[in-house]
Image: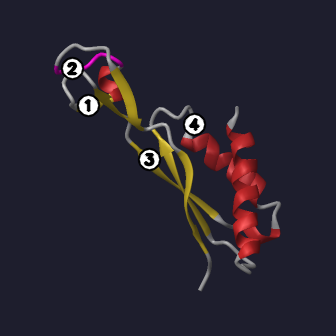
């Protein structure tokens, strides 16, 4: 389960940003997680709860996941299509000259502090 390791990196980055901005408490962290990122959102949230509550600045902090659909671009015909449904072969022209446009993201989108 690599989600725990990812949670440690998220915590490190959130704490750094909070310190740089004089923030004493974080209430929510919002993540963009791509559909083909290999991250299982439920596992990430479980690991988050366990690890975040060990940090004073993050006690009770919620982790929200914004899923990012995987989209592939075809160089053959110039169209975009859903990656998971069609894979590497373009459903429009049959070309395999394709590349992942989005859907592999694992990024902090937003850090919310209490008012």
Give the quarter of the image for residue 54. bottom right
Q: Are marks 4 and 2 in contact (CB under 8 Å)?
A: no
Please give the residue where the numbered disc 3 appears in the rendered image.
67
Q: Are marks 3 and 1 in contact (CB under 8 Å)?
A: no
Quadrant of the image containing the C terminus: bottom right
Which sits earlier in the primary sequence, circle 4 or circle 2? 4
What residue is rendered at 74% in x and 81% in y? 22
Please give the residue where the numbered disc 2 appears in the rendered image.
91
Residues shaded magenta:
88-92
Please give the residue where the numbered disc 4 appears in the rendered image.
39
Q: Are marks 1 and 2 in contact (CB under 8 Å)?
A: yes
Residue 33 drawn at (x, y percent): 51, 45
Which sits earlier in the primary sequence, circle 1 or circle 4? 4
Q: Does residue 12 appear left or right of residue 32 in this picture?
A: right
Residue 29 drawn at (x, y percent): 60, 62
Which sits earlier in the primary sequence, circle 3 or circle 2? 3
Is-magenta flag for residue 87?
Answer: no
Using a 10 Å C-alpha cutoff, classify the residue at mark 1 as few (fewer than 14 neighbours), some (14 to 19) or many (20 or more): many
Which sits earlier in the primary sequence, circle 4 or circle 3? 4
Q: Does residue 15 sit above or below 41 in this rendering? A: below
In this view, the residue in front, 49 or 94, is 94
For residue 73, say whether it is visible. Answer: yes
Quadrant of the image containing the N terminus: top right
Using a 10 Å C-alpha cutoff, classify the residue at mark 3 as few (fewer than 14 neighbours), some (14 to 19) or many (20 or more): some
Please give the residue where the numbered disc 1 appears in the rendered image.
81
């Amino acid at each position: 389960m690599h989600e725990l390791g990812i949670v440690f990196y998220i915590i490190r980055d959130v704490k750094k940003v909070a310190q740089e901005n004089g923030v004493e408490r974080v209430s929510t962290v919002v993540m963009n997680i791509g559909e083909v990122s290999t991250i299982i959102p439920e596992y990430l949230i479980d690991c988050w709860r366990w690890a975040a509550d060990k940090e004073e600045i993050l006690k009770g902090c919620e982790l929200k996941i914004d899923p990012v659909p995987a989209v592939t671009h075809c160089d053959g015909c110039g169209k975009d299509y859903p990656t998971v449904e069609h894979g590497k072969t373009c459903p429009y022209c049959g070309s395999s000259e394709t590349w992942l446009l989005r859907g592999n993201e694992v990024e902090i989108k937003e850090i919310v502090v209490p008012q």
